[in-house]
Amino acid sequence: MAKPKPKPPQALAARYLDLLVQHRGLTEHDPQSNPVKLLAFDISHDIETGAATVDGLEGLAKHLADRALIDRADRLKAYLGCRTEAEALAAFQAMVRGQAEDENMSFEAFAARWQRPSYGLVLTAHPTFALPTAMRHILADIAAASNEDDRKAAIARLDGLAHAPDPDISLSLEHDETQAALAHVQVAVRALSSRILAVARELYPLQWAALVPAPMTVASWVGYDIDGRSDIRWWDSIRFRLEEKSRQLARLSANAGALPKGDGEGAGPYGRAVEAICDRLARGAESAARDEAAFAADLNDDDAFRNAANRLTGGDSDRLVTTAPVLELLDPAIAAAPDDGAREALILLKADLAGNGLGTSHIHLRVNAIQMRNAMREYLDLPGEGTVQSRLAQARLTEMIASVKPVKVNFGNLDHEQTTARRQFMLMAEIVKHIDAQTPIRFLIAECESPFSILAAIYFARLFGVEEQVDISPLFETPAALERGGRLIEQLLDNPSYMAYARKRGRIAIQTGFSDAGRFFGQIPAGLAIERLQIQLARHLASRGINDIEALIFNTHGESVGRGCHPSGLGARQHYVMTPWARWNFARAGIALKHETSFQGGDGFVALSRPDLACVTVAGLLEAEAPPEPMAVEDDPFYSDIAFTWDFYRALRAWQQNLFEDHDYRAAIGAFGTNLLHRTGSRQTRRPDADRPASLAEDLSRIRAIPHNAILQQLGYAVNVVAGIGLAAGPEFDRFVELARRSPRMGMVMDMVAFSKRQSSLTAMAAYGAIFDGGFWVARAYGRSEPGTTAACLTLARLVADNARFNAVSRLQNRLRTDAISLHAALDEIGLDGGQGQGASLAKKDEPHLLHAVRLALIMRLALLAARLPAFSARGDVSRETVLELLMAMRVPEAAAILRDVFPATETEGRLAGLTEPSSYETGQARGYPKIHADYIRPMEDIYRVLKDIGVGLSHRFGAYG
């Protein structure tokens, strides 16, 4: 019998949204009724009675996800300021001119402002590639559309595209995406640098040509970050760096080829200089391409390894290892340029070289503190973890740094080195010797909680001869690191070996992690703790009179609120992770500050995926990074009423930390765990040894920040942003409300909370508990309205009878709702919309609620199919009940693999495959179990695919995945 034709998704949406409104009205008579759960049952009932099909619901889910994506694109447009590229460039130029005129800048002051980059943008390949590449481009095109026709054309391209990642997200794909974004950023920086030169030419007509603009730096760690992963081989990193070198030199050669050739008198020397520049860059690009090709081979092969190593270390007159040979040609060309246009083009080429060196960006390498300690342990000959961290060990290490002599290493040493941290320093040594000797390299140490790891890194930097090129940076993201970070900084500043190294580099570098910190103790406490650490750095430097070196702070965060991204715009984005008050603490002490922020993975690359969007984004970032205005502590009661704000911080942090350790919270997060999430990157979603089924219920720290946030999005509630605020404010409610009204800092926090609350729904979260409610399944069987489901419902009721997840979810949502009551009261008093009102505010949640209901109905369908599976004899530790439990936990691929083994579609899939003796006798066993595949296994797999796609659709409301 032919399958019934699915109803149009718009018709289904209209019908089910009407039902949702009806169910919502029931709460006036029964406050415990759940409209999402009731609607999910309606849809499930339609499936079981034939009134709806899985195919039709897939179409409905796609329709709703498309609409959510379009809304996300509109919010992105607003986030970037609703400006065209031309408007952004004009605004930036006006800012540059305004600063110069308002401060009556001399040329020297103007050059000091724009030749020292005070901002840096860092691209990382965090696993947020939830959208296919084509859909990310559509998202960007909708946001960039300047007219309705372009907007409609972009939206039309959504047809047929699933809300699911590309099938094979490899490190190479992530690197390619990164390089594409970097290319757009380079074009944007070049355009903005041209506007800086335009202002300089107007204000300083006799001096402007001496200016080499450097408004910002660009960096990437894609291909170099090995924290928590072991799949990046050392030669992969070398190959990536050579590829970047080849691309950059080819790009610069093309830019040089487009230079004006000059006319008339003086064109000869100028023209010859331009020709020489083009030739030198082209030869350098070709040499780098040959080097890259050698490292593209499989270096597990001995001959390939020797060939690649000898190729890169051998003589090649075309190879560039520094920019000096090109700069030697550029300066005479600038002097000989026939007009200002040619002179500016050459200056911009020089700025490109100065800013990025011989690569498309700076690079960051990252390891973790344990790897650093393990690498250093044998040098100290001190057993035990505690001993390595002792003051004695640190004193000994300080002495060793002062006396260590550099050693020479080659690719053989690099290939044979088994210790991760030492191998990374050898890798940097080979990059500096043979690829790029000048461009700074950042060395990040994750989970850094003591000075020992930093001192160990300085020792290895000196040992392997890269001390003058590498900026070593601790990463503060764990509760312990943020709590003790100020003291760690003090210890480093008082260490003579560290300060000698820092003065040689001209900077002190630290990194903070909003994403992981927000996972451990809530995003709002994390942001406040990080601000405190930033201010401590400024004050520790000031108290020691250290203002002759730069403070470099790299604040890493994602694109969602749960991972530290403020939703109100680029200005708020920058000032949330580095507040005006923190910035002013550096400025008033006369300490030069460089601030860096991250754009992570697929979601972070959207705003950089078109040249025009990249220009608007970069211009907005640089406007936000303007020097801070003078502030007094009295200007913001958040800082003047420090006793109250400190009490609020401690109460909220304790609430979030207790929740993170709470069994009910872990049970709710672990109910489906990561099983409903797509693989959205090349990096694993769980940390090593985190693959045991019960691990999430035991220890949530085993799961990374992105999937942790993604699970919260799937459940519908941004717990780590909105939870605890209401109760933390409760003891002095009126004082808290007044603070939020008067304080710009607290106002920014509460804007973030209000946005997250508008996207969140405890109703949706509570509805998921129905799957694990034995009473729900018994009541459904008792109703007798669905012929053929009674036995399956009773099977499910028995299966979940002793399952604690339903009670855990119920207790958790009661706890969260109690807090939300106080939060909504506070938001109402402050004048912010938390999404709890009636009318339009509540209706905005209807489509997300419908998407949750569709998903829940499909989970019910999958559960009922599972309960109807035929019995089979236990095989080892695998029984029918094992399969049912796997399916209820949404571990569908594992269950399907077992079922395929138990019920092969044809016998040739099993034991009889490959027999050569012919047979004409067929039995049921010989024919296999095609009906079980058609009726159960494939339908369950189809549903599972749709469930994961819906997860991506739900994430659009939060502005990013995870």
Image: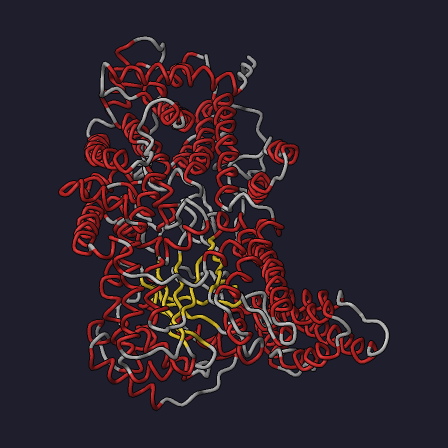
Front position in the image: 399 or 869: 399
The x and y percentages for residue 162 are 54, 34
864 in relation to 461, above or below: above
588 in relation to 611, above or below: below
Q: Residue at x 36, y 81 (%)?
A: 459
Q: Residue at x 24, y 28 (%)?
A: 800
Residue 353 location, quadrant: bottom right
Q: Residue at x 18, y 44 (%)?
A: 735
Front position in the image: 266 or 517: 266
Q: Is residue 862 visible?
A: no
Front position in the image: 575 or 155: 575
Q: Quadrant of the C terminus?
A: top left
The x and y percentages for residue 11 are 51, 16
Q: Is residue 743 left or right of residue 235?
A: left
The x and y percentages for residue 15 are 45, 14
Q: Quadrant of the N terminus?
A: top right
User: In this figure, which colouring scheme has been used for the structure?
Assistant: secondary structure
Residue 241 location, quadrant: bottom right
Q: Is residue 199 visible?
A: yes
The x and y percentages for residue 534 are 31, 64
Q: Could you tell me how many numbered marks the image carries?
A: 0
Farthest residue toward the right? 264
Q: Residue at x 31, y 63 (%)?
A: 476
Front position in the image: 220 or 622: 622
Q: Is residue 275 left or right of residue 370?
A: right
86 in relation to 372, above or below: above
